[in-house]
Amino acid sequence: MEPFLKLATNNIRKTKRIVDSEVAENYEVLTIIALLTGIEKVLNTTFFLMYISGKIDWKWMKNNRDVEPGVIQCNRGLSAKLAKLEELGIIKNELQW
């Protein structure tokens, strides 16, 4: 996730050079959306691999929705995924939002 964080930090720093405040604000919002999308993609891959390796059960993955086994559809949100990683001991420190 570090490359996503570096890219977002660099992009937000660049907004200080933009004269039009509305354009700068839009650029910052788009940067944050891109950052969260990138993190979500990394987490989806992580949870898919954790399911395949038996670390996470199917019931947690499908979030009580009617999804047939073998169909990978990650329905959990970013917060739930981060909480699960913390619960499993993969994230050692508490994230501050």
Image (spheres, rainbow, N blue to C red):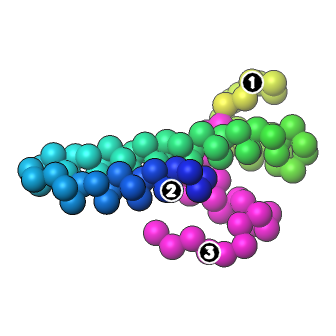
Neighbourhood count class around disc 2 (C-alpha, 10 Å): few under 14, some 14–19, many 20 upward: some
Q: CA distance from mark 2 to mark 1?
A: 31 Å
In the image, taking residue 16 as reference, residue 75 lies left or right, namely right
Q: Which mark is residue 33?
A: none
Q: Residue at x 22, y 46 (%)?
A: 26
Q: Which residues are magenta?
A: 74-97
Q: Is 49 located above or below residue 11 in the figure?
A: above
Q: Which mark is residue 94?
A: 3
Q: Residue at x 19, y 56 (%)?
A: 17
> Does 87 appear in magenta?
yes
| Pointer 3 or 1: first along the chain | 1
Q: Secondary structure at mark 2?
A: helix
Tag nearer the camera, 2 or 1? 2
Of residue 28 and residue 95, the one placed in the foreground of this image is 28
* For the residues bearing labels 2 and 3, Cβ distance under 8 angstroms: no
Q: CA distance from mark 2 to mark 3?
A: 17 Å
In the image, taking residue 57 as reference, residue 24 lies left or right, namely left
Q: Is 82 located above or below residue 4 in the figure?
A: below
| Pointer 2 or 1: first along the chain | 2
Neighbourhood count class around disc 3 (C-alpha, 10 Å): few under 14, some 14–19, many 20 upward: few
- Amino acid type of disc 2? Leu
| Pointer 2 or 3: first along the chain | 2
Task: Tell me, yes or no, if residue 80 can be seen here.
Answer: no
Q: Residue at x 57, y 71 (%)?
A: 95
The picture places residue 69, in percent across and down from the top left corner, at 81, 27
Where is mark 1, residue-wise? 71
Where is mark 2, residue-wise? 5
Q: Secondary structure at mark 3?
A: loop
The picture places residue 78, in percent across and down from the top left corner, at 56, 51
Q: CA distance from mark 3 to mark 1?
A: 32 Å
- Amino acid type of disc 3? Glu
